Image (cartoon, grey):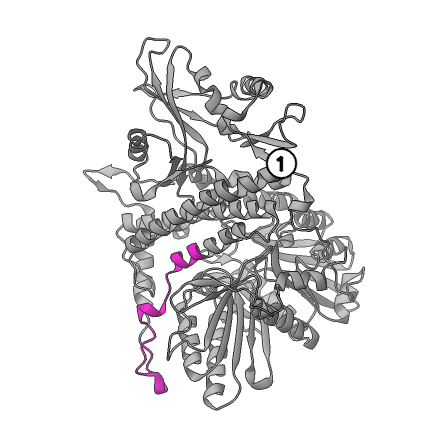
Amino acid sequence: MNTRTKDGGGLDEDPRARVYARRSATKKAEQPTPTSAGNMEEIDLNRPDLYINRELSLLAFHRRVLAQAKDTSKPLLERLRFLCIASSNLDEFYEVRVAGLKEQVQFGSVQSGADNLSPQEILNRISVAAHDFVDEQYRLLNNEIIPSLEKENIYFLKRDQWNDAQNGWIRDFFNNELLPILSPIGLDPAHPFPRILNKSLNFIVSLKGKDAFGRDINMAVVQAPRALPRLIEIPADIAQHPQDFVFLSSIIHAHVADLFPGMEVLGCYQFRLTRNSDLFVDEEEVDDLLRALEGELPGRRYGDSVRLEVADNCPEKIVNYLLKKFELGQKELFQVNGPVNLGRLIAIPDMLDRPELKYPSFTPGLPANVGRNLFSTIREGDILLHHPFQSFTPVIDFVRQAAADPQVLAIKQTLYRTGPDSVLVDALVDAAKAGKEVTVVVELRARFDEEANIRLANRLQEAGAHVVYGVVGFKTHAKIMMIIRREGKKLRRYVHLGTGNYHAKTARIYTDYGLFTCDEDIGEDVHKIFMQLTSLGRSAKMRKMLQAPFTLHSGMIERIAREAENATQGKPAHIIVKVNALTEEAIIRALYRASIAGVKIELIVRGICCLRPGVAGISENIHVRSVVGRFLEHTRCFYFHNNGNPEVFCASADWMDRNLLKRVEECFPIENPVLKARVIEQGLKLYLADNTQAWVLDSEGSYNWLKPVEGETPISAQQTLLLSLAEKS
């Protein structure tokens, strides 16, 4: 929540200012020195032109998502879904990334990354790119998506298209469903401009005439109820087509005059405000993280303004009035030709029973070796699940069986995001109530899931589970679960390690790996991690796993350097990495050095990539691609050739500063030869062969969508995995 107060034209110290001061000091202390080792001493790997800006790279990823909506080979309702996802992505980009940059400018921070761009320079570039992005969104909606929907008899009816029967039904809907809960606010000294909720739908109304008390009111604000859907389906008996919809905004527009009897409505224009939604808690200054977050949650709806969206027919005078009210400039203004809350259209695919306009349904498969008793199955050998192509059910069954098994003594698990109605949390509650020792590390600071995580933490505590909130200053992002079971005269540890969250719903749309094992060394490593998280004891040496913030960063750099050394000795050297983001500067410099040494480096980076490939003499041996398709690519996998003895790891961590240095993360080896081969072939090489959903990053920082050339067989990694791993329908 913003707590600044003005005092003589200056600002009292805001807690955020202290944090930015600390970050700037830390950043300055961490500035890298030029490479000076061996035959690379003359090469400056810190040159700003070798690095792509983080925020602009993220915007480029959002563009790749938007491009899916333009792809006519995709089912129509999936194109609409991608359009909405791109819109929601941009919302979060402004709520968090742009909001953070604006704060840096406000508090005088000069912090910059390896690209050497100042916060203000980045904001200027974002404004240009974001306006182009939004223009493309609405052009796509109005010129392609809506006409294509109409060809399928799905219509969004405008006011001038309503017939008499529809007008009557809509009037009744307004009177019965809207009028009782609308509170129009005329603007005068007794009725100041209302507080506008983050991303809510609002209308600024221009009026003429006097109100009931004889006052001249020329402006009012109407706030649309958040509880009502933004799209309403017309009843079939009065519809003009098989599926007719009207926007809630159209209904309010049509009957806004009913809210101001005796006055003339000169105009009604929708607008939407995006606010800073990044919760601020200075962890060095709080005693109880849960209570501190609970206190900050209400303020998320009313953070500082960062963006204004308004109908493009709104008069300039009213637009300027709104900008002044929200303390925004022209660069933060988006005038749009369509609904300002575009993301709400994502409800349409779920409202329509039109399977021919959606992706074909599928049933996730199961490995052949997964039996009914998971404990006996795991004892026979490690199990690797590849979601969503393979089912998440064994993960839930793992906890359910543990809760019901009298030989199970304890369950320990980390939770980052689980969803509001988690069957896995239900199983943990059952286990606690059954008398098991249940310990759960709940990361309260999972962005936008804080409120849900507070509720599940309270629920687990009420059931008798031990709940801790991780480590102050380090988010617990690791995905680990351990079950301790008495077997004969000894205790055995059964472990699940994942690259994604314990979230049954996202396991249907995110690609992730999950490993079941009872390997003693890995069990010991996981035990040590839980001891760190609960007792806060010193870090103990791991046997097989790597862990952030202790050994993962250095472990990756050491392995990259080993490949570089092998290459200089004339040995084969090859690195393949699949992550969601690559931003960490020391990792990037290590990859540059390996490339210079002659290592073949293939990077599959879904989103942000700050490394610039293809630079002569530096990164010409590095190739970067991003795969964007039906499922959100979320696996993190690392392959190192290691002179013919390959090492393969999966991890919860991306190659980002925050993951490697400021979070608790796990990275685990895949040692079973069959499973290792699966990860290499299905999780890495297949994605390198994809020529339908892959985007290739060039040395200029641009992404080019890869298409099969004439005579080349089209390959989609995701579709291939669906056909090979999911159950046959």
- Residue closer to the observer: 278 or 223: 223
Residue 527 percent location from the top left of the image? 61, 65
Residue that lies at the very extreme toward the front in this rendered image: 710
- Element type where label 1 sits in the image: loop
Answer whether residue 446 is magenta in the image: no
Residue 458 percent location from the top left of the image? 59, 43
Three-letter amino acid code of the residue under disc 1: Asn
> Residue drawn at (37%, 77%), measured in percent from left and top?
616
Residue 317 percent location from the top left of the image? 28, 29
Q: Residues within 10 Å of mark 1 (few under 14, many from 20)?
A: some
Quadrant of the drawing holding the C terminus: bottom right
Residue under pointer 1: 153
Residue 149 percent location from the top left of the image? 58, 40
Q: How many marks?
A: 1
- Residue closer to the observer: 81 or 634: 81
Q: Say above or below: 599 vs 383.
A: below
Which quadrant of the view contains residue 59? Answer: bottom left
- Residue closer to the observer: 506 or 406: 506
Answer whether residue 45 is magenta in the image: yes
Q: Say above or below: 60 vs 167.
A: below
Residue that lies at the very extreme toward the left in this rendered image: 8
Q: Can residue 449 be seen at all in this image of the molecule?
A: no
Which quadrant of the view contains residue 637? Answer: bottom right
Q: Is residue 326 left or right of residue 243?
A: left
Residue range (magenta): 34-60
Q: Say above or below: 619 vs 252.
A: below
Q: Say above or below: 634 vs 238.
A: below
Q: Is residue 710 left or right of residue 558?
A: right
- Residue closer to the observer: 435 or 586: 586
Quadrant of the drawing holding the N terminus: top left
Q: Can residue 560 be seen at all in this image of the molecule?
A: yes
